[in-house]
Amino acid sequence: MGILIIEKKEWVANYEQMKSTAEMAELTLKREQSIHTAALAEAKLREEKLKRLLELKMNVFPM
């Protein structure tokens, strides 16, 4: 009976450790997704600015 209690404690400890690791991985994923989304938005803004500049240049200096 004592062996079963010890084994159960080991299983519970293992479960808690895996749960903690999974939660940390999920938080890391969410943080990286947020960073990626922000970088993508910034790149789109730069692209739009460059397009406007190119249009202006083409209007001022037509080919």
Image: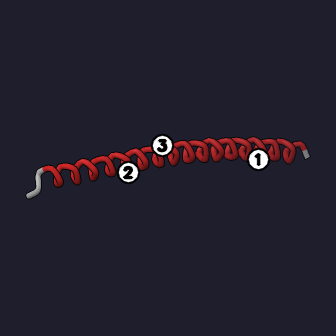
Q: Which mark is residue 11?
A: 1
For the residues marked 2 and 3, what is the alpha-carbon distance in whole angstroms? 14 Å
Left or right of residue 41: residue 18: right
Picture coordinates of residue 3 (x, y %)?
Answer: 85, 45
The mark lying in front, picked from 2 and 1, is 2
- Residue 51: give its label: none
Task: For mark 3, give the secondary structure.
Answer: helix
Q: Residue furthest right?
A: 1
Residue at figure coordinates x 28%, y 50% from the top left:
52
The residue lying toward the viewer, choosing from 45 and 40, is 45
Q: Which residue is mark 2?
A: 44
Residue type, mark 3 in image: Ile
Place residue 39 in its image quadrant: top left
Q: Could you say where residue 36 lies in the image, as x and y percent from the top left?
A: 45, 47
Classify the position of the C terminus by image quarter.
Answer: bottom left
- Do tag 2 and tag 3 residues touch (Cβ < 8 Å)? no
Amino acid under disc 2: Lys
Determine whether the residue tagged by mark 2 lies in a helix, strand or loop.
helix
Give the mark nearest the N terminus, 2 or 1.
Answer: 1
Q: Which of the two marks, 1 or 3, is nearer to us in this view?
A: 3
Rendered residue at 46%/44% (across/down): 38
Look at label 1 and name its amino acid: Trp
Nearer-N-terminus badge (1/3): 1
Residue that carries the numbered disc 3 in the rendered image: 35
Q: Are marks 2 and 1 in contact (CB under 8 Å)?
A: no
Q: Secondary structure at mark 1?
A: helix
- The residue sitting at the bottom extreme is 63
Q: Residues within 10 Å of mark 1 (few under 14, many from 20)?
A: few
